[in-house]
Image (cartoon, helix red, strand yellow):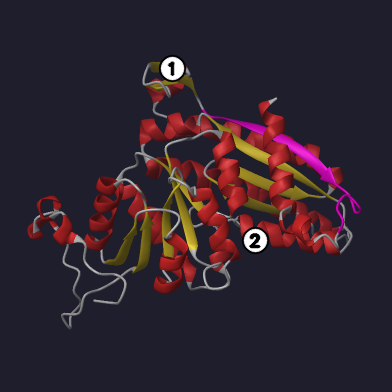
Amino acid sequence: MEPGFEDEATQHPASQEPLSAQPDLRDDDGQLRTGGRVAVVEDDESTRFFLVQSLRANGYHVKGIEDGASAIPHLRVLRPDLVLLDVTLPGITGFDVCRLIRRDPLLRHTTVILLTGRAGATDRMAGWSAGADDYLIKPCEISELLARIGAHLRTRDNTRRQWLNPVTQLPAPAALQEEIIDRLHRGESFAACYVDIEHFKSYNDRYGYLAGDGLLASLADILRTIVTDLNVNAQLADRPQTALAGHLGSDDFLLVVAPEEVEAAAAVVVRRFSEMAPALYRAIDRDRGWVPGLNRKGGEERFPLVSLTVATIVHHPGDIDLANEDALAHVATDIWQQLRQSTQG
């Protein structure tokens, strides 16, 4: 067993799965297969133990960490490939730990998945601002958690793909940040179009996370097609190819285009999505125009079919001081925070 990833099963022997329920994780030579190193930062003991044992049963080297204050010293020793990070840690929050990870030269490229019981826009923005790669709403199915971890780790070692969202294969926030900074340094004006799927959670709850991922991938395909069309037209007109689509996380996307193209591009996104989305529902839900589900208080509620909310902003040279490194480091986050807030008004 590798140092730092010691077995915690002796602490809760009654909670272990029977060996017959665990998959065969040995290769042809009898060696234990491993999917990578994962650290679980979770203050609730039973939740931490469940996550640690579930991940170990699926071939990962796992270490549980009980609080945010001790997380960074442990992580610097462990050097995990991925961190599952609870948001509501006592003292130092998960957001704070994520920021510290991104500032640490040994840890800054570690994949971070936030675990949160809060699904509000403010919390999602805080996660992106802190530098998280992904987040899941608790409680979540272990199958969904394993799928997310596997997707992130499969793309981790590929230099090009590590900047892509594993579900949609669109540029993730880190890649969008670099692209926007490059445009600022080139002195280019650009427009950002924020695209949010309304009622995505009700669709995900109704049909399952695999169907939800399919919905996200379908919107990503629409955005890719729009970007291709815009860049082909720019090439034919001997203009710079400026269009780019990205996935901010969960059901939030960003489309970066030339200022004069943003209104038309936003209209095309909404139209194509509204034409595509109904086909993803069962006939009974599609015909009545809503799906049953539970609201945040646990009460039954009828949720409309998914739709898009879009907001746009135009950024000009001189809107930010390029010599201000702190402002530049958060410019992309600031842009999509402004856009997200405008959709809440």
The answer to whether residue 84 shows anywhere in this view is yes
Q: Amino acid at mark 1?
A: Arg
98, 311: nearer the viewer: 98
Q: Residue 146 at x, y = what percent?
A: 33, 54
Relative placement, left or right, of 187 versus 77 is: right
The answer to whether residue 268 shows anywhere in this view is no
Q: Residue 42 at x, y = what percent?
A: 36, 50
Q: Residue 162 at x, y = what percent?
A: 54, 66
Q: Amino acid at mark 2?
A: Ala
- Residue furthest out toward the bottom: 29
**Quarter holding residue 275:** top right
Dot 1: element = strand
Circle 1 packing at 10 Å, graded few (<14), some (14-19), many (20+), is few
Relative placement, left or right, of 280 versus 192 is: left
Region rendered in magenta: 306-321
Vertical placement of residue 199 versus 123, above or below = above
Residue annotated with mark 2: 175
277, 175: nearer the viewer: 175
Q: Residue at x 88, y 49 (%)?
A: 319
Report if residue 157 lies within the magenta region. Answer: no
Vertical placement of residue 179 versus 1, above or below = above
**Quarter holding residue 192:** top right
Residue annotated with mark 1: 302
Residue 3 has which mark?
A: none
The mark that comes first in sequence, 2 or 1, is: 2
Q: Residue at x 31, y 64 (%)?
A: 62
Circle 2 packing at 10 Å, graded few (<14), some (14-19), many (20+), is some
Which part of the image, by quadrant, shows the N terminus? bottom left
Relative placement, left or right, of 215 versus 16 is: right
